[in-house]
């Protein structure tokens, strides 16, 4: 198959071959059926087939030809898209800096001419941007490099690199320009970086998946949100928080509790400092998802806080029969008249009249986050924009709203007086839309679900996990609870589902997702192929637990020996099926079989569980098929009393710690 | 709860000192003896006896005691931690937080690992409080409580006798060795008989410094971790596991260590059989027979410098300023407040006081400016520092004003 090597997709720093970690490599290893699914390549592969098969293939071709032809096949043509995700205006309002996640750069737009005037190469997977008070320096978080690029805005060049935590995302600078705050998604904390010395002074504990930051107008407070719920008691509603940092003391002074919330995105403060807004999801993961047609899977909503509302108030943005999935970017007009919210799954901007909103809050004495009729009182417009809109940014005078359309490589410009889209800035990305991009668009849209309720990315936030356990099957309340599994580098880990019930990705993404989850119209064959292509293309994120030279620490070496041991400590042989490396074997550390390891619960229809892959297992807590193990330790300290899940009960605490240190490196 | 300011001294005259006091002390005690002869000069005598303590820069306090009657979660207080204007008290039945004049209690229902809180440490950089309990370690961060146990984390054992913070590391002393949590990476490192000279794994207290981390190992002496080299070294009683002191000042006083305090590169050690001080070259030991310690049974030592330290004993709170000693307690027989001063020559002087810590069995100490907070077996005590004129220090005034 032809492969156009145009990508600069970041590769994993590991001993694995690079091809394993690139989109290209993934495609080359895709199951045969997938590569053939587009039809045309079958002739290449099976040129010597019998006439009967040729006849069948002709029919297939005829059927495909009768459909809208895909723009290209699902072969490995990999374009270099931009994926704009966040924006920043220069102090004079003339320049728009756009963080482009996929091209590892900041693109600079001159707003007067709408021209691209600069491209600043930064680190891998940049996710956030802030500027010094005078605008001379930009700070860009590089989520895959665990650092921050300091950019000279005039020269448009990186002049310094600052350390941060695991997967730095949101960033703000204090008013004095002396301290940088960075939200680290994987280490779930906030780096406090002294800009004078360039050193990370300390880390502050934030919510799990800390990602977005906003400063109060007076600079005294910084608010931090997080995309995964904080660990809680098994099978109880999830909780999240808005972490409040006192910039004077540089410590966390408050955690605003967000009850029944999992997935909090952008947070913003009004210019008068009296109203704070955070975009969020209220999942209904405790009841069977089969009830999607009777209720809803997510409440797309906002949390309001600040003197205008008193305690945190949650408000819905959905309507009774229409949902606005994945609320993400938030901006509040300078005069606080309107609030703008991007809905990443519904590809629109929701406009809220703040006065009406506050009236609703003050006149409704009971919580109304689940009353979907409420939004009619304050939502005044829904403005269609590009695909997967993320960051929302208002001009200084509040007259224009810029929206980063991540999967269109464009910026929507909205006139805030009329609430109408007035123009779209093309950032100069490829015009050809390849299979992965098409699949990515399908993954992030909520178009296919009943009433537009949700999309793949509602649960797989940013194509990862959501930290939740779901009651998916229509088998009654509380039956077959399943934890959300990682999507990283899935090729070679089939079958899918925790019970191994789906033999391949098309089954997983097709009948299971489109028909059971979405309960709406189905994907076409081409769409399904594209979606599968995209899912298979998701690479591993960098592993933070391995030494830079790839070697293992002494503790990790000891853990590896335990993982690979064949004898218990008393000298008796461990049965082959009870050795760690038996089930967790092969390049993905799964033998792709299903087995009962004693972790089944009375509520499970079967105790037989698909052996999960282990790479980057450190990122995907909680554990076990139902998420009942809060940590890797609990897999063995709590849920392995009879040594069915490997022989571990002869291990000392030290040895168990060593084993876990090794597992984190996989 | 008493909030009255000022001080009123006991109407009973203090005991006079023995002969052979240092000149300065003799002047004061001699004058005191004369003045005490007449009732009309009684007050002046008392004041002068108090002045004795001040003259030697020995702190005097007005003690304000908290019990369950005043909102403390429990009267058995294992430890106390000062966090700015906030006071944390680890008790047998909950973690108490004293703030704005009121107590708030945290228990397992609030997310705390266990109601019995044995140890406390403050991460001054982040403001987070770490609580060692009988069932794990809790991190209290702006109201959120996360708990680490031997089941859900790499913590070596759930009984956490001691906890300390050193940069990004949280060190714990547990019933099954030492643990260290790297708060940036989440990695746990365990230290015990397998990888240190720790022959007894019952660690009781930890004192982390920038260059060294010290552990009191109950029955195993003291362990030293060198931060730069990541190596361990043990210090043991040269007399072995005996209660005899054959070779005093040649090493640690006893193997049954209960507390360590490392300040200004000086190590202080508390044991059930006396105290030790180690400057990296020489040891000096303290026993009741040759120091002002009221007892050789020590629960804790807390140094405030290379030459000054406070001691929690079963017979009162003791302070050593490098020369003189002071003891604060309710009298062991009458339970009336008393304060003793011992000078370098061994002269004992009883200072008349009206208040004392809640109980003579002292378990923990922390400082709030010039004030001191003391955990006792029957309540938490706040020692409000008095200056030479008998009035409170500015900080104490501010604290009381704040409380009011």
Image: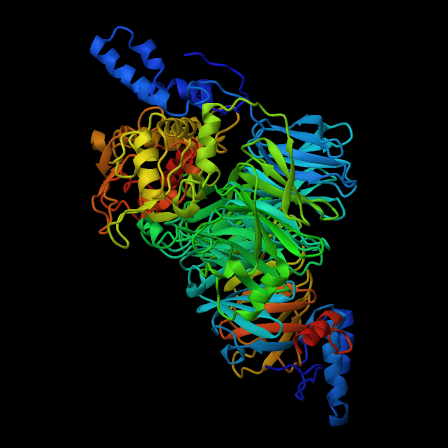
B255 or B73, nearer to the observer: B73
Q: Is residue A25 left or right of residue A565?
A: right
Rendering quarter of residue B391: bottom right
Q: Nearer the viewer, residue B259 or A206?
A: A206
Locate residue B199: give its quadrant.
top left
- Residue most extreme to the top: A48
Residue B239 in sight in this render: no
* A312 is higher (above) or lower (below) than A381: below
The quarter of the image holding the N terminus of chain A is: top left
> Percent position (x, y) of residue A537?
43, 26
Which is nearer the eye, A634 or B281? A634
Give the left or right position of residue A555, taking residue B209 as reference: left
Q: Is residue B84 left or right of residue A56?
A: right
Q: Position of residue A457 (x, y in %)?
A: 45, 40
Q: Is residue A575 left or right of residue A590?
A: left
Query: Can you say which quadrant of the picture contains the C terminus of chain A?
Result: top left
Is residue B320 visible from the viewing direction of this image? yes
Vertical placement of residue A178 versus B120, above or below: above
């Amino acid at each position: 198959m032809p492969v156009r090597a145009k990508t600069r997709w970041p590769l994993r720093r590991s001993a694995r071959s690079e091809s394993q970690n690139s989109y290209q490599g993934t495609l080359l290893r895709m199951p045969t059926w997938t590569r053939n699914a587009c039809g045309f390549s079958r002739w290449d592969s099976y040129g010597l087939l019998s006439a009967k098969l040729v006849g069948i293939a002709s029919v297939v071709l005829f059927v495909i030809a009768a459909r809208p032809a895909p723009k290209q096949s699902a072969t490995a043509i990999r374009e270099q898209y931009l994926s704009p995700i966040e924006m920043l205006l220069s102090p004079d309002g003339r320049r728009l800096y756009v963080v482009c996640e996929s091209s590892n750069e900041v693109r600079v737009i001159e707003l007067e001419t709408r021209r691209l005037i600069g491209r600043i190469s930064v680190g891998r997977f940049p996710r956030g941007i802030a500027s010094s008070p005078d605008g001379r320096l930009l700070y860009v978080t590089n989520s895959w490099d665990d650092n921050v690029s300091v950019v000279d805005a005039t020269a448009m060049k990186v002049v310094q690199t600052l350390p941060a935590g695991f997967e730095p995302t949101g960033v703000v600078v204090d008013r004095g320009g002396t301290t940088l705050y960075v939200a680290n998604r994987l280490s779930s904390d906030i780096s406090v970086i002294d800009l004078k010395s360039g050193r990370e002074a300390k880390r502050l504990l934030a919510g799990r998946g800390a990602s977005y930051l906003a400063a109060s107008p007076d600079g005294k407070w910084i608010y931090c949100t997080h995309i995964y719920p904080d660990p809680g008691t098994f099978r109880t509603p999830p909780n999240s928080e808005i972490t409040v940092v006192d910039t004077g003391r540089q410590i966390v002074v408050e955690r605003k509790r967000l009850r029944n919330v999992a997935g909090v995105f952008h947070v913003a403060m009004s210019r008068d400092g009296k109203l704070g807004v955070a975009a969020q999801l209220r999942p209904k993961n405790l009841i069977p998802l089969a009830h999607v047609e009777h209720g809803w899977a997510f409440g797309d909503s906002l949390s309001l806080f600040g003197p205008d509302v008193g305690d945190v108030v949650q408000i819905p943005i959905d309507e009774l029969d229409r949902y606005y999935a994945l609320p993400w970017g938030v901006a509040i007009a300078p005069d606080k008249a309107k609030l703008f919210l991007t809905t990443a799954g519904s590809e629109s901007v929701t406009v809220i009249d703040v006065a009406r909103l506050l009236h609703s809050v003050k006149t409704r004495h009971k919580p109304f986050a689940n009353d979907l009729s409420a939004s009619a009182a304050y939502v005044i417009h829904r403005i269609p924009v590009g695909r997967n809109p993320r960051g929302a940014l208002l001009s200084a005078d509040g007259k224009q709203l810029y929206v980063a359309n991540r999967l269109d490589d464009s910026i929507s410009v909205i006139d805030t007086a009329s609430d109408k889209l007035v123009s779209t800035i093309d950032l100069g990305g490829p015009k050809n839309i390849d299979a992965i991009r098409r699949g990515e668009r399908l993954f992030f849209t909520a178009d296919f679900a009943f009433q537009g309720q949700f999309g793949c990315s509602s649960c797989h936030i940013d194509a990862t996990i959501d930290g939740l356990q779901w009651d998916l099957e229509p088998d009654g309340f509380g039956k077959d609870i399943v934890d959300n599994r990682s999507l990283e580098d899935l090729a070679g880990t089939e079958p899918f589902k925790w019970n191994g019930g789906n033999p391949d990705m098309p089954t997983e993404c097709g009948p299971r997702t489109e028909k059971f989850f979405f309960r709406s119209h189905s994907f076409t064959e081409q769409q399904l192929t594209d979606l599968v292509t995209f899912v298979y293309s998701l690479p591993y994120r960098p592993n933070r637990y391995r030494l830079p030279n790839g070697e293992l620490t002494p503790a990790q070496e000891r853990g590896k020996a335990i993982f690979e041991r064949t004898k218990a400590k008393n000298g008796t042989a461990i049965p082959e099926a009870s050795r760690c490396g038996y089930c967790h074997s092969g390049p993905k550390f799964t033998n792709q079989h299903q087995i009962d390891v004693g972790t089944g619960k009375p509520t499970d229809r079967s105790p037989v569980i698909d052996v999960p892959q282990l790479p980057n297992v450190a990122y995907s807590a909680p554990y076990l098929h139902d998420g009942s193990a809060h940590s890797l330790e609990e897999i063995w300290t709590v849920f392995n009393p009879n040594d069915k899940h490997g022989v571990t009960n002869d291990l000392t605490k030290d040895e168990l710690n060593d084993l876990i240190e090794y597992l984190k490196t996989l | 709860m008493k909030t009255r300011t000022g001080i009123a001294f006991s109407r009973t005259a203090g005991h006079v000192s023995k002969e052979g006091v240092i000149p300065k002390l003799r002047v004061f005690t001699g004058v005191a003896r004369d003045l005490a002869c007449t009732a009309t000069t009684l007050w002046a005598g008392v004041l002068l006896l108090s002045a004795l303590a001040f003259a030697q820069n020995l702190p005097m306090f007005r003690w304000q005691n908290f019990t369950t009657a005043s909102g403390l979660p429990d009267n058995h207080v294992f430890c106390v931690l000062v966090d700015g204007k906030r006071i944390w008290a680890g008790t047998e039945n909950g973690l108490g937080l004293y703030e704005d004049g009121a107590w708030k209690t945290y228990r397992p229902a609030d997310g705390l690992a266990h109601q019995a809180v044995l140890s406390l440490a403050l991460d001054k950089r982040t403001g987070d409080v770490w609580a060692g309990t009988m069932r794990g370690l809790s991190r209290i961060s702006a109201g959120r409580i996360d708990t680490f146990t031997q089941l859900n984390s790499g913590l070596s054992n759930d009984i956490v006798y001691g906890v300390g913070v050193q940069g990004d590391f949280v060190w714990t002393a547990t019933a099954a060795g030492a643990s260290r949590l790297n708060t940036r990476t989440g990695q746990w490192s365990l230290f015990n008989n397998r990888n240190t000279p720790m022959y007894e794994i019952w660690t009781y207290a930890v004192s982390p410094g920038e260059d060294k981390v010290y552990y009191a190992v109950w029955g195993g002496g003291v362990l030293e971790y060198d931060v730069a080299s990541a190596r361990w070294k043990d210090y043991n009683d040269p007399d072995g596991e005996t209660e005899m002191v054959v070779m005093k000042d040649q090493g640690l006083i006893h193997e049954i260590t209960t507390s360590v305090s490392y300040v200004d590169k000086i190590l202080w050690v508390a044991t059930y059989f006396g105290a030790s001080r180690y400057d990296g070259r020489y040891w000096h030991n303290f026993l009741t027979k040759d120091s002002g310690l009221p007892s050789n049974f020590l629960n804790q030592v807390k140094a405030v410098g290379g030459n000054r330290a406070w001691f929690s004993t079963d017979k009162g709170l003791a302070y050593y300023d490098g020369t003189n000693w002071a003891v604060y307690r309710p009298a062991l027989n009458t339970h009336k407040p008393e304060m003793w001063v011992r000078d370098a020559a061994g002269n004992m002087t009883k200072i008349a006081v009206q208040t004392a810590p809640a109980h003579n069995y002292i378990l923990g100490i922390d400082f709030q400016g010039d004030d001191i907070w003391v955990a006792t077996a029957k309540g938490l005590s706040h020692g409000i520092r008095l200056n030479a004129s008998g009035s409170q220090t500015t900080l104490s005034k501010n604290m009381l004003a704040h409380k009011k």
